[in-house]
Amino acid sequence: MGKLNKEQRLEKQLAKKIEKQDVYQEVKLQEAQEDDFNVANLISTLEEQGQQIDSVKTQFLRVNEKARIVQEPETQAERDFQERKVAATVMKQDIKKWLPIVKKNRESERIDFTKQRNVQRAKISDTSNALLNNNLGIKLQNAMEEVEKVEQQQQLNIQSNQQKSNLQFYNDLKMKKISSIKSKIYKQIKKKKGNKEKLKLMAQLTPAERRKEIEKLRLSRAKERITLRHSTKNKYVSQLLRFGGDKKSLKQQQSFLNNIKHQLLAKAQLNELEDGEFDEENFREQAISQLEQELQDIERREKEKQNNFGFLDKQKKQDLQESKSIAQKLLTMLKSGNDDAIQMEESENQEYNSDDNYQPNENGNKDKSKVVIENNEFIGRANFVNETKQLTDIQKKKIDAKTSLSNYLNLESEKQQQQNNSEKQLTIQDEKKQLIEGLNIKNIKQKYEKQVNKKLSNKELKQLQQDPDELLQQNLANFNLVLDEDENENAFIDEKIKDMEEELPPEPVNTKGWGCWAGIGIKERKPLSQEQILQNKIKKIREIQKKRQDAKLDNVIISEKRDSKFAKYLVPKLPSEFTNSEQFDQLHTLPLGPEWNSLTSHQALTQPQIITKAGVIINPVKVPQQINKLL
Amino acid sequence: MVKFNTICRTGQERSTNADITKVYRNPNPKVHPLAHAREYQRALVATKVEKIYAQPFLGALNGHSDGVSCIEACRFNLSKLVSGSYDGEIRIWDIPSRKTLIQLNAHQQMVKGVSFSRDGMRIVSSGEDKTINLYDFPQLLEQSNNTFQEPLMCYLSKGTLGNVDHNYQLPQFATAGQVVQVWDYERPKAIMKFQWGVDSVSCVKYSPADTNLICGTSMDRCIILYDVRAESAIHKVAMLNKSQCLAWNPIEPLNIVIGNDDSNCYTYDIRKMELPTMIHKDHISAVMSVAFSSSGREFVSGSFDRTIRIFPFNKGFSREVYHGQRMQQVNSVSFSGDAQFVYSGSNDMNIRIWKVNASQKVGIINQRESNATNYRHALKEKFKYNQEIKRIAKHRHLPKYLMNKKKQRQEMKESKNRKLKNAELNNPGQYEAPKPEKQQRIEQFIQ
């Protein structure tokens, strides 16, 4: 029996196992179909099979509902990390209260620790310089206008404002009463309501979003844990912490904005052209107004008394008429709006800009002479511009003069060549040429080569041979007007080479047999030819040239001679704390001693940056009371 | 007949206030062509005179029978100083008379740290024997002859202890060690514990201005910042070498200075601990202790190379070096409350008192004298870029071992740079530009 029983049992067990496997396979199949394994799916499959699992189902539902409210358990490491993160942000925000104090300390000229007072807070006006920008200026202007509008409205609607304020007061009272209800039941009900709403919201969210929400909650809790006290964070406090000042009234704001606006305008007037932002219309308007003023000035001067000297009066009249006519022309051109006119305008305006503080003349005898001079210049330039455009005969002559002179000079050198011995291969010109190659001055070199290679026409040659001086004298007058760059540049190169030659060590006197070995069987050394000497010289000059500061600067000669007597007063290198030499020189402009200053200013100049006194304990910094109260 | 004796004065002889002749000077610089040269000469003389009168060492406090491990000047009273030594003895000194007021056999092993409370009434000490003692200063004074006085409170720590630092406002103090602990007067157990990582913290300091913040240096080469309000630390930086000491700037509570074992000091901004804002170089071996001046403009550092150096807070190199023939490794330094004196405790059992400005006169200075010194300082400041003046002002006499070591270091640095340059030249395009030095010293920033 026992055996049978055993067999029966085994059969039963096997049957159970098979059943379980079947159920498992079914579940697995379902999983494969839905690609997702859930407890909910499992329950549903079991229900379909007809098994009674009500208690399990209810339990599952309860847990599921709770999971929405109760967070997933977080690890200690995660929790620590989150707390550190929050602590860092809180610390960084909290530490901002020291910034105005630190800034003030660093920027102040001197700190007196003997007075034992809290360090003053930074003012808003201190930061105004840093805010200077053209775009900002425009924004500030707009803000100014808005502030003004608001003020005007306030003035108009005083009565309505009063009504509003009364209403607000009533509302405030009501809110106070509501907030003062502190019964436990009320708060519990409120909390439950809030929780329910949260649950509803959470149920709608996807799991990823829910996780994010939960993280947010955790962070806020960590923050609460850390800060404990709930500090106020209204606008007033944030402003106080940021600027270290009281809340500004409208008038204060306005004055602050006004201040910046004036600074901006002053700066903009100086830098408008330099910045390259150029408004044509603005310029035209300005020019027209200036020209009109000039015309008025001219008329006024015509009416004035005449001098005793007739010739002076005549000249004055002529000048005035000329300037008047040109001004009128310009006016008409400007108003019509031609492009050429604008170009002229530009040249005129550049003149004005050369004087930084140009203001149109209004009164005073002194200014008149200035105006006359300016007008003359103005006329001269205008004429010049016109002439260059039309390419008159005179100008052509000028150009002719330029070429002819240079040719004449070259010719002279050619004559010298012929006179010299034919044995010398290197001429003065070639020497120059080689040196210039060493100088690496491309532009100058090209010009110089052109001059050498140019050949004169037969006619010109004949003329020059006959009477070169006459031709020169004819053109010299016009020659001054044209800048003869080539000639100047050549002179400049000569000067530079001369400067380098001076630096060469003195050549040894070439006495025969001196410094050589003597005796039987020794060949006598030949003295260097002039060619070799020249080449050596060029080599040496090139070496010197590399060492010079002006090696790479084409148009500059830097004198490197230094008077040793003054060396001790000078600094070999600009200290790194300064950006330019002018800044550094300003250190030494003002003597500090009592011989050159009054006693009070001497003491003020020589006061140390940090004043301490033996016996006075310096306490660590404190937050000013105003800020401390609010925190 | 009565005779009258009269004194007769003519109007011309009599002197009145109106008779003082005023001297009018022409301020036009063209009239004074030699002003610059004269001032230069004065500046030169001033720098030389300063060198001649430079006598920084004021005196020594001797009495300890073992090396001095830690000292701290009183925060309330300028004349008091506490020191602890390697044999567990604590002494409280009166600086003007240079005598010990109180001698205590406080700990069975080395004294790790001592600290005064802000009001100067309480003294806290921590020892290697895992005990922290809290003393009442007036009570100690009453029985000044008793060397075995019992403390007001004795706290027992589970782990080993580092230094101790008293809070600047509250009746609390923090101790370093295996765990950073914050203690209250009234509680026998620590009210707060911070632990991050395995290794212990060697030094811990409260911020004097913002008393919620604590900074510590740990043995795993980290610098850790704690907020007392939080349950954990804020962040930490791992450097290449271990740091042993730190100090907070009391005027700018954003900045801390750290003395490192690589012989440099580092300034950190606690908001951005990723990189140090400045490296202060000059020491030759490990920096053992740093202390900030109460003016916040200078800090002093004591080093294993037997010197003390004073650094400006914003300069990379030291302004002053102090050393003595018999002075051994400096274990601890402290600034006096008025920023005039520096105290140093060293391995040779002495505490030394130094002037902060070596040539400054100690004692009463009248107005004329102070004006003159001010003028001299201003002149030196004005001409400090001139080579001759710079050379004289910069020169300090150093012992031979320091000079040799310095030279050696310079040579090593140059050869290293040369090597790098050559490597770059010979293999163009293969070598990346080396990191800036500040970045090189930092291993990791951990949030």
Image: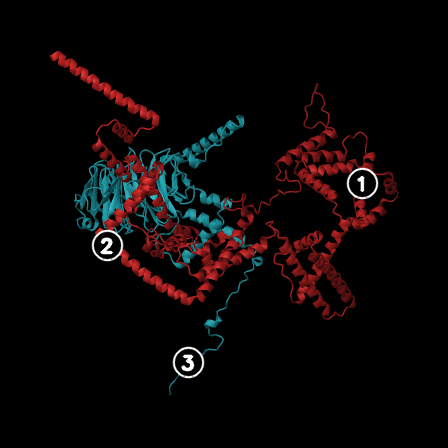
Chain colours: A red, B cyan
- Three-letter amino acid code at disc 1? Asn
B85 over A479 or under it: above or below: above
Q: Is residue A169 left or right of residue B49?
A: left
Q: Earlier in the sequence, mark 2 or mark 1?
A: 2
Q: Is residue A446 left or right of residue B7?
A: right
Residue at the location (17% across, 49% down)?
B143
A124 over A18 or under it: above or below: below
Q: Which mark is residue B385?
A: none
Name the residue that disc number 2 marks: A182
Q: Are marks 2 and 3 on the same chain?
A: no
Residue B163: give x, y in percent of width and height: 27, 40
Label 1 residue SS: helix
Instruction: Provide the chain ID for the residue under circle 2.
Output: A
Quick check: marks 1 and 3 in contact, CB under 8 Å?
no
Instruction: Provide the chain ID for the residue under circle 1.
Output: A
Q: Quadrant of the N terminus of chain B?
A: bottom left
Residue A293: give x, y in percent of width and height: 67, 63
Q: Does residue A594 appear anywhere in the picture?
A: no
Q: Label 3 crowding class (10 Å Cα cut-off): few <14, some 14-19, many 20+? A: few
Name the residue that disc number 3 marks: B6
| Distance (Cα) linking label 2 and label 3 | 98 Å
- Three-letter amino acid code at disc 3? Thr
